[in-house]
Image (cartoon, rainbow, N blue to C red):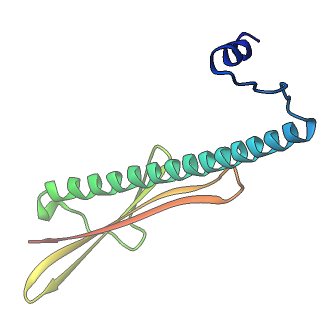
Amino acid sequence: MGDRLFLKRYFNINPGPVKAMTLAELLFAMSIVATVLLTMIGALTGGLEALQKSTSYNQATILAQTTIENYRAMDFAAIPVTDSNGIVTTKGDFIVKVVIDQGTCNGQTFKKITVNVLKEAAKGSRGEVKKVDVTMESFLID
């Protein structure tokens, strides 16, 4: 009430009667706010799921790269040649399969190391299946 008196006294402005929002205006404004909030929550949920999946891919890539680097650090003759079943180990939630083949090309002996890192499928909040599968290959020459 003081603001209205101030405007009238010093600026000779009569702001008119005070108007309140009607129920229809209030409901319309609340529906807009609710729509915006629901959209933001949906975007946040999708972003968090994408972050979780990319973190799993990053972990699988690092695990595959570390496995290959461990074989590179070994002496060439000490690296075992495997069959198609390979060497299967489990590290945390990941299944690591290493297949090592030996061959020759132009008189050079090489070993091909294939590392496959798999994280079994898990259900997301929206019901979709999330599976991580990373494969890396490296060739070592004697």
Q: Whole-percent x and y of residue 72? A: 17, 59
User: Height in image: 135 above or below 10?
Assistant: below
Q: Is residue 10 left or right of residue 54?
A: right
* Relative image position of residue 130 (x, y in whole percent): 59, 58
Which of these two is toward me, 73 or 66? 66
User: Is residue 95 left or right of 31 when viewed as pictured?
Assistant: left
Tell me where residue 138 appears, x and y as whole percent: 23, 69
Name the quarter where the C terminus is drawn. Answer: bottom left
Query: Where in the figure is residue 30, as x and y percent of width and height?
Result: 80, 39
Between 68 and 142, which is closer to the camera in this rendering? 68
Nearest the camera: 48 or 58? 48
Q: Is residue 37 above or below residue 79?
A: above
Q: Quadrant of residue 37?
A: top right
Q: Residue furthest bottom?
A: 106
> Which quadrant holds the N terminus?
top right
Q: Quadrant of residue 20?
A: top right
Front residue (pair 101, 72) = 72
**Residue 92 sits above or below residue 20 on the image:** below
Q: Kindly identify the residue that appears in the image at 36 percent across and 72 percent down.
A: 83
Q: Residue at x 73, y 17 (%)?
A: 4
Q: Quadrant of residue 8?
A: top right
Farthest right residue? Answer: 23
Q: Outermost residue, top direction?
A: 2
Give me the residue at 85% from left, 33% from top.
21
